[in-house]
Image: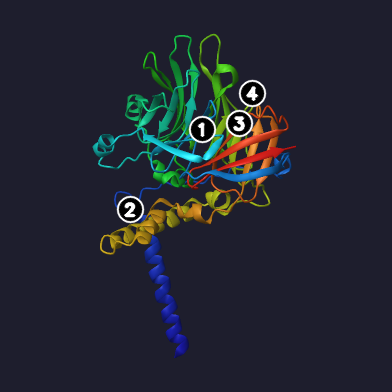
Amino acid sequence: MALKCLAKFIFKIIVMLTMFIAFIMLTPESIMFDINTEAVNIPLPATLDDYKSTLKMKYSSIVAEIPGPESICYKNGKMVTGALDGYLYEFDLNNPANVKRLFRLVNDKQLAASNYTRISRPLGMKFDSKGNLWIVEPYFGIYRVKNVFTSSPIIDLVFDIDQTGQIGATSIFFDDIALYEKSTGGHILYITDVSSKYTLENFVLILAEPDRTGRILRYDTDTGKLDVLEDGLIFPNGIESLPGNKNGFIFSDIGNRSIRKCTFDNNNGKPKMINIISHMASETDNIRLSANGQTFWLAMLRPRCESNPDFSFDIMMRYPSIRRFIIRSLHLFGKILEFIYQFIPFERLEYAAELLKTFKIHTIVEKPGCLMLEIDQNGKFLNSFIDDKCTKMTEVREISSPNYPNERILYLGSFINNAMRKIILTK
């Protein structure tokens, strides 16, 4: 009798699970969350021998308490960064504890015009030779700020993200920018256009699907001409101009775990794209010129090889149906928690709903560790350092140290950590 009851119970559980799985997988995308998963299998390196640390840690400390200092710029002894709260922050290298909150690029009127579906969150930023600061606002476009360290900054929206509708799908997520200064005084802007489907809030889903709407855009500030240099990318991220104001750039192709280089034909001006590094040991976020102005620092996640793949980034990417089921289920549970929050306004409930809906729960269980890799413009590895305790690093910004030529002074940005780190590396 007991065995018969147990069999009935197991049968009911199987039926209920089957019905739930069928509901999650077969419900039309017009009703349930739209996610079109596909199988992805990017090979990892056989070993991490090429990525072993060539530098040693001499010093490490927190230098500035700033919420999410994603990208960092340096000019005349001062640093500026954009934060999670939408503001720019400034601090002096001689007194980094004295952090000054500056201003937001996006005003309340602009936020209200979008019914607050868009937020202000400065990402990639670069100074030009005149001291103007160019900044990416992922939901709005490219801003230029003159006199950023004064009491009277001049803020201009140079390129509105909605202009991308002129060349195809309208983008909803910009990430980074590279500058080429023309002899006319104008600029060519090279922009990593991440997605026309997912916003910054859903950045994890861009990789989890993966979403192939990423593009590299070129915009001429003199003529207003906008064109696409490459499309079909999965999360194009950090981008940096070639040394010496040479017209070209390298950028991070996260979806293929590669670094690509773009130069232009001298005769017809057509872009030539090549991979200078393929099948890397981890994903690269921002790319920045080193202090010598000739090499590049790559901010990368924890390195992996064939013998230690990541469960989410490597193993699960081979199984699209399982990924689709997990993501749709978590999104449904998130929507349920969001509904409950309307009646029980508990902050942790709202936070949990956001983590589930956007699949950001993955970032909580992510293993610690990061890789700082220095390369030349042809992709040759020059120096590296693996930090097993570092988490969620987005940028490596090097400051020159003429008095200590054997030291590499690096400031580390993060999209979510509430502080900026300074480290000193030596041979």
Upstream in sequence: badge 2 or badge 4: 2
Upstream in sequence: badge 1 or badge 2: 2
The quarter of the picture where residue 265 lies is top right
- The residue carrying mark 3 is 399
Upstream in sequence: badge 3 or badge 4: 4
Residue 379, horizontal then vertical, whole percent: 65, 29
Upstream in sequence: badge 3 or badge 1: 1
* Above or below 394: residue 341: below
Callout 3 amino acid: Ile
Upstream in sequence: badge 1 or badge 4: 1
Q: Which residue is at the front of the view, 89 or 21?
A: 89
Q: Nearer the viewer, mark 3 or mark 4?
A: 3
- The residue carrying mark 2 is 32
* Above or below 15: residue 90: above
Callout 1 amino acid: Met
Residue 177, visible in the rendered structure: no
The quarter of the picture where residue 337 lies is bottom left
Image mark for residue 79: 1
The CA distance from mark 2 to mark 4 is 49 Å
Quadrant, the C terminus: top right
The CA distance from mark 1 to mark 4 is 21 Å
SS for callout 2: loop
* Above or below 136: residue 390: below
The CA distance from mark 3 to mark 1 is 10 Å
Q: Residues within 10 Å of mark 4 (few under 14, many from 20)?
A: few
SS for callout 4: loop
Residue 144, visible in the rendered structure: yes
Q: Residues within 10 Å of mark 1 (few under 14, many from 20)?
A: some
- The residue carrying mark 4 is 294
